[in-house]
Image: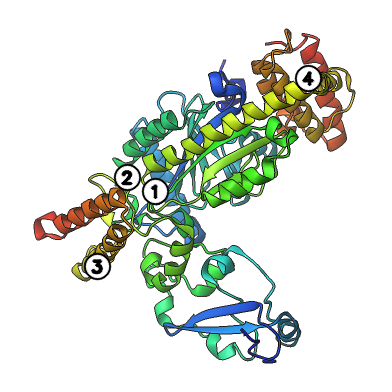
Amino acid sequence: MLCDICKKNEATIHYKEIVGGQQKSLNVCAECAQKHEKASGMNFGAFNLAEMLFNLGKLSGGPEMEKEASLPEQLTCPQCGRTVKDLHDSGGRLGCAACYKSFAPLLEDVLNRVQRGRVHVGKRPGVKRRNIAGNAAVTAAKLAALREELARLVKVENYEKAAQVRDAIRELEKAAKPEGEV
Amino acid sequence: MSISPMERLLRNPVSFLGESGDDGLVAVSSRIRLARNLADFPFPPAAAPEQLTAVRDLVAEAVQRGRIFGAGTFRFDVADLLPLDQEILFERRLVSRDFLNNPAAGALLARADESVSLMVNEEDHLRLQAFKPGFALEEVWQEVDKVDSKLDGKLCFAFDDTLGYLTSCPTNAGTGMRASVMLHLPGLVMTGRIAPLVQGAAKLNLAVRGAYGEGTENQGDLYQISNQATLGESEVEIVEHLSRVIRQIISFELQARETVQKKDRNNLCDLVGRAYGLLRHAYTLSLAESLQALSCLRLGVGLNMFQSVDLEMVNRLWVYTNPAHLSKLAGHPLSGGEADVERARLFRDTFAGKRAE
């Protein structure tokens, strides 16, 4: 891939940002990155966990990035007020349980890379549990994700894991019935 | 006469070092930690000071009312501790460096024998951990699972049907579990097989770290092997998967020791003997020097080279060679140079039988 700025050298630095739900990317070579860093105060080289996890670069400073630096509303957590910038500054730490929903588009990639599966198959809390997303639409979305995972597992013939996911689906279906509401 | 909690703590043998069965000479200790958050509060990195205080009080009350840790439960509030006492907790592997760096409403609760403990307001509201000497992951899981279930009866944890337990860092979501075994691997170090081990572990999605966790380098041939992924596998699967790998590493280590011994037993004995000589007779000793020599001594104990040195002595020295524990023995904080002199004195006295307990 060629550098977006000079269009000559091979791009070795890949900068990604999600703006208004759309992913925008900038691919530059080391030389242009250095020039750009000096000119704009942007720091491509700074490496922290947030960047590694979420592909978040520095979110303010550069003239070309200025417009994009105004963060979209849907990527601020309505529950705790955490922003993408907060994630960046804290090394990728989420602010509350609801952040998992608020930053879902960013989390997708992290979970795919770091984790072994997409569905929790381990221990569950007892009676005092409170599902952070108890409403029907969210449950439906979750069921859809679980069914997708089930299909994937069956395809790769991981029947043991598939059985666990099937049980998770059953449990969620049971919980989704009115009398099962927490 | 009552003694302070810190004095009481210091009288304990360190929980992760002790008699540890057949694998004991390679597997030093097994540890599992679970990350949990309260559903009704922001996670610590986003919480206001008064919210952190509320979380600390709720958790402390749940622990007390639920008699989670039984009689003689320890409670240490980070902000109230002297720097030296904070270091004592770190050296005993009860707290992390991050925890000490953010003292606001941070508290440590622990069972009287330190085998199970709880950091409140580290990166997550609760970081529950259990330790056992030797290779005992399954037992440690049963222990920590029991305590977690008791806490679950008192507190409402943030949980999602698909993503499991929700944690401040998404790399911990799901089980919130990190299981690790600390291994003493001088044989693999001597035969130059540590690098392939680290690479192999990475391929199996396992992490290899120094003895004191993230960001610490290995000292005295100690390595911690732990799981990386927390989502998509159950706790039992994580323990089984890790245990399989650990068993294999232990057998590789024992093979390596045998190879070295067969190839050049004199050389090996010389290494151990010189380490003993250093510790027995030196008048200044740095921490790194002492840890390296202790590693050789531990190896010598495994090869039945000593009559007067046993594993218990090595384990005790392994703890007391650390700066904060050494300062406690001396009765006052020690500067770097003073610590080296005091450390050498501790080793000389121990081997001369003056400090036997």
Pick the residue in front: B139 or A10: A10
Measured in 3D between alpha carbons, the distance from the residue under mark 4 to the one under mark 2, in whole angstroms, is 49 Å
**Badge nearest the viewer, 3 or 2:** 3
**Badge nearest the viewer, 4 or 2:** 4
The answer to whether the residues at label 4 and label 3 have Cβ atoms under 8 Å apart is no
Quadrant position of residue A56: bottom right
Measured in 3D between alpha carbons, the distance from the residue under mark 4 to the one under mark 3, in whole angstroms, is 63 Å
Q: Earlier in the sequence, mark 1 or mark 4?
A: 1
Quadrant position of residue B309: top right
Q: Quadrant of the N terminus of chain A?
A: bottom right
Local crowd size for mark 3, using a 10 Å CA cut-off: few (<14), some (14–19), many (≥20): few
Quadrant position of residue B270: top right
x and y percentages locating residue A142 in the rendered image? 26, 65
The answer to whether the residues at label 1 and label 4 have Cβ atoms under 8 Å apart is no
- In the image, what residue type sits under mark 3? Ala
* Rendered image: mark on residue B265: 4
The residue under label 2 is: A123
Measured in 3D between alpha carbons, the distance from the residue under mark 1 to the one under mark 4, in whole angstroms, is 46 Å
The answer to whether the residues at label 1 and label 2 have Cβ atoms under 8 Å apart is yes
Which residue: 47% across, 35% down?
Answer: B243
Which residue: 39% across, 48% down?
Answer: B175
Residue A9 seen by the camera: yes
* Rendered image: mark on residue B175: 1
**Badge nearest the viewer, 1 or 4:** 4
The residue under label 3 is: A144
- In the image, what residue type sits under mark 4? Arg
Measured in 3D between alpha carbons, the distance from the residue under mark 3 to the one under mark 2, in whole angstroms, is 22 Å
Figure check: B11 above or below B204: above
